[in-house]
Amino acid sequence: MMNPKEFQRLKERAPFPLLITIIMFFAPQFLIEPQVENYETTGKAFDAVLRSVNDSLRQRNQERSLRDRCEAVGREMARLNAWLPPEAYLPTLIEQVNALAGIFGVNLRSVTYRFPGPSPESPTRRVDIHLALEASYQAMRGFLQAVEGLPSPLVLTEVVANQDRTFTVSVQHLVKP
């Protein structure tokens, strides 16, 4: 059994352990909950920053890719401009066509050309050349193969064979803009 004095002293000290028990019971709610909320807020902010960084990296990679493509297109355009002859080359080209016609026994009746403006279908500068020719079928085939073999950017667009051994040939000649 307990001594009455010890019991009295225990009663006097009882509020203190009770107070400590109450504090320990509510401490997590007051101390830990704000830390958990702070952790959640920090986690959300971190996720937002991480998404922003990933978007920035993706955008930077796309920008690099587009810049590389732009440089490649620029190099190809420079190479194409170096290859395309100027408009002043047209008389030389017509002389070459005339010489080929003489070699293959093709009678060159007329040559007409025009400079159409750039269109959405064909933004490059070109010269449309129309040739009226008289020849046999075999001579015409050899002549057309020789014209296609010229070191100029020529594109045969139309060949019309008429009944009277005449041919109409349309050619596009690409030139520097």
Image: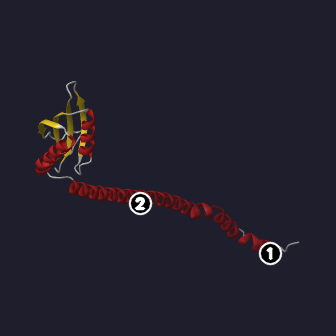
- Using the image as rendered, state which of residue 19 and residue 123 is in the foreground: 123
Residue 172 higher or lower than 168, as above or below = below
| Residue hosting label 1 | 6
- Using the image as rendered, state which of residue 2 and residue 106 is in the foreground: 106
- Using the image as rendered, state which of residue 139 and residue 67 is in the foreground: 139
The residue drawn where x is 17% and y is 39% is 128
Image coordinates of residue 112 in percent, x first then y, are 11, 37
* Residue type, mark 2 in image: Leu
Q: Residues within 10 Å of mark 2 (few under 14, many from 20)?
A: few
Q: Quadrant of residue 144?
A: top left
Q: Is residue 22 left or right of residue 135?
A: right
| Residue hosting label 2 | 57
Quadrant of image for the N terminus: bottom right
Q: Nearer the viewer, mark 1 or mark 2?
A: 2
- Pointers 1 and 2 in contact (CB under 8 A)? no
Report if residue 126 is visible in the image: no
Image coordinates of residue 22 in percent, x first then y, are 66, 63
Image coordinates of residue 27 in percent, x first then y, are 61, 64
- Give the CA distance from mark 1 to mark 2: 74 Å
Report if residue 34 is visible in the image: yes
Q: Quadrant of residue 34?
A: bottom right
Q: Residues within 10 Å of mark 1 (few under 14, many from 20)?
A: few
Image coordinates of residue 152 in percent, x first then y, are 22, 50
Residue 127 higher or lower than 27, as above or below = above
* Residue type, mark 1 in image: Glu
Under tag 1, what secondary structure?
helix
Of pointers 1 and 2, the one earlier in the residue sequence: 1
Colour scheme? secondary structure
Under tag 2, what secondary structure?
helix
